[in-house]
Amino acid sequence: MTQGLYLNLGCGSITLPGEKPPHHVVVEDALYQYPLWTNVDWNAGPGVDQVWDVFRYPWPLPSNAYDGAFLGHILEHCPHKPETNDKPPKEFQIEIHPEPLDGKFVPNFAYNTPNDWWRQRSEELAGLQDGYYAFLAELHRVLRPGAIVHILSPYGWSQGAITDPTHHRLMTEQLFTHNSDDSPFHYRDAGAKFEVDAMNFQFTAYFAHLAITPCDGLEVRAYKEREFRKAIATQLNVADNIYVKLRAVKDDGENHI
Amino acid sequence: MRILVIANHYTVCSGRYISDAFARLGHEVRHVGQPMGRRIWGLDVPERYVWMPDEYPGDEWADLIVIADSDSVILDGSRQFAQRERGSMVVYGVDNHVRHYRRPWIDHYFLAHHDGPVQAVRQADETWLPCAYDPAKHTPSPLPYAERVYDVAMIGVMYPERVKLIHELRAAGFKVLAGTGLVHEDYCDAYQNARISLCMSIAGDVAQRVFETAAMGCVVMSDLARDLNRLKPDGFWIYDPRDVVAGVRAILSDPANAQVNIALSMDWVRAHTWDARCQQIINVVTEAEGNTVPFTGGQVLPIDELRLLPVDELRHITDKALPWAKRKTSQ
C-alpha cells in the first residue's frame, strides 16, 4: 500500500480534510479536500491523530513517508533553540501492532527504530544553527522527494506578525532562500533543501487594489507588480499573510535510517 | 501497428490509459502533446506520477493517430495531419456530454457517452466507446471485505452536492474516505480498502470510476446515469437519491449480499478494459471482421483469488435484495 499521506503539523482546531477557514483565503482550495491526512498537535482534540510537540526533535515519524504537508500558522512559533529528545516520546514507547492506525497506514516508527538512531539524530539537530533549521531538517526527512509543503503564516511586516508575543520569527519572502547555496550566509542547516514553487500574499484592505485580477491586461499587471514590490519593501501592513509552496529536493535514496 | 496518441499529458487522462493499453496489445506506441506536470484538479500530485511525452516521431510515422483530448487547440491543430497519405486519424472523446469534437478532417469518433448530449452517437462515423478500467492497475483488492477500513469511498472532485452527501454519511456514523488528489497507486489503495464505491455523477454521465472500482472489488453504488441502461451492469446498487444513508446502511447490514454484488459486478466488468476499448478502435479502423461486436477481448480478472462465495451458489440471494435499494437497470 502506498498511501499518499499529507502532514498537518500544529493543526490546532483546523484538522484536515475539512472546511477551508475564511482566513485561509490565499491557500489553494483543493488542499482542504485531499482525503488522507495525519493531523498533529500538542493538544488532543477532535480530529487530531497524533499528540506530540512539533518543536521537539526528532519527530516520531518515518522517513520518506509523506507526499505533502501543511503548516498553517505554525512556523512563526518555532523557537530558536532546538529542543531534542534522545529517545522517542513516552507515548510512543509501547509496542503497537503493525496495522493501520484508525485507517491511516502510519507504522509505529518510533517503537521500531533503534535508540542509537534517536541519540544520533537528536545530537545532529541540537547542533544546528537555529530551531528553524531543525524543523526544516525533520520536515525534509519525513517527506518524499518532490513533496510540496504549503506554508501559511502572518507576513513579517504586519500587525499580526509583530504583535503576537508567541511569535519567534518574522516570515518574509526572503526567509526561504536565506541560506541557499548562493547566499552569503552559511548556517548549519543539515543540508535540507527546499525550492520555492510558488508564493502569494493576502493583501490588507489598504492595498487590496494591488491584487491582480483575471481582467487585468499586461500593462495593468506590470503596474500592480511594480507598485506591490515598492510597497512591500517600504511599508508596513501591505499583506496580512504569506502563502508559500516549497518543494522538497532530495534523492530517492535519502533516508536517515 | 504504429499508433500515435496525441493528448495533453496530465498525470491522469484517457490518453495515458489508452497508450498503455495499445502497448499491451502489442502495438508500437508514441504519445505526444503538452507536458502538464504534476498539477491536476487544483493539487500537485506526487512527482512519480507525472506523465512525460515521447519525442515526436514525425508526420508520416504513424499508421493510426488517436487524439485523446477535448482541448480545441489539439483538435484544431490536428489539421496538420489532414494531408497524410496513409492511415486514419480518429478521436477518442470522454467529454462528448459537454464538448463537440467534430472536425472535417477526422475519420472517426469514438465517444464515451452514447447520448451526448452535446455530441451524441448518431452518425456512421461515430462509435460508442465508454470508459474502462486498466487491468494492470485496477486489480482486485487483496483485503477481505470484512477487514477493509472504510465503509464508503468517494475519490474525485468534491462538488458541493458530493460534499453534502459525505457530511450526511459521516454524521450517520459511517467511516468515509472522500476527497480529491489521490491518483494511480494511491487511488487504488484507497478503494481497495473500502467496501462501497459511491458514485455520484454531476452531469448525468457514467464515470470511469464505476468500471475501476468494480474491478477492484467494491460494491458500486451509483445514481442512475444515462448510459447505465445500455451498459446493463450487474451487481450495481442504484441508490435512491432521497436517502443515500439508508442505502449504505442496507448494503453494510448484509455482507453476504454485498459480496454477491461484488462478484456479479466483477464478472460483468471483466470485458470493460482499456485493452478491449483499444481493440475496438483497431477493429473499426481496420474494418476487421466482427468489428461490430463491442467490449470483447482484454485481460481476464483473477476473481478466484478473492475470498468470495461461489457466484452460482449465491445468485438466488439477489432476488431477496431490498427492492428500492437495488433497482436493476435492465430487464
Image (tube, coloured by chain):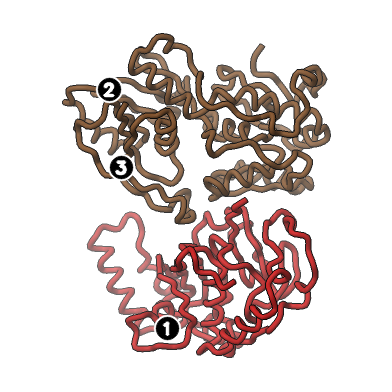
Chain colours: A red, B brown
Q: In the image as oriented, which residue stretches furthest toward the top?
A: B289
Q: On the image, numbered disc 1 is attached to which residue?
A: A236
Residue A235 vertical position relative to residue A146 in the rendered view, above or below: below
In this rendering, do the residues under marks 3 and 1 share a single chain? no
C-beta proximity under 8 Å, tags 3 and 1: no
Q: Residues within 10 Å of mark 3 (few under 14, many from 20)?
A: many
Q: Where residue B296 is drawn, which disc sits there? A: none
Left or right, B51 with reference to B319? left
Q: Where residue B33 is drawn, which disc sits there? A: 3
Q: Amino acid at mark 1?
A: Leu
C-beta proximity under 8 Å, tags 1 and 2: no
Q: Amino acid at mark 3?
A: Gly
Q: On the image, numbered disc 2 is attached to which residue?
A: B88
Number of numbered callouts drawn? 3
Q: Amino acid at mark 2?
A: Ser
Q: Regarding mark 3 in the picture, which secondary structure is present there?
A: loop
Work out whether residue A245 can be spotted.
no
Which quarter of the image is occupied by the C terminus of chain B? top right
Write down the quadrant of residue A205 in the picture.
bottom left
Residue B242 vertical position relative to residue B179 in the rendered view, above or below: above
Q: Residues within 10 Å of mark 1 (few under 14, many from 20)?
A: some
Point 68% across, 78% down: residue: A53
> What subunit carries mark 1?
A
Residue B54 vertical position relative to residue A18 in the rendered view, above or below: above
- The residues bearing labels 3 and 1 have C-alpha atoms spaced at a distance of 46 Å
Point 39% across, 22% down: residue: B281
Write down the quadrant of residue B187 in the picture.
top right
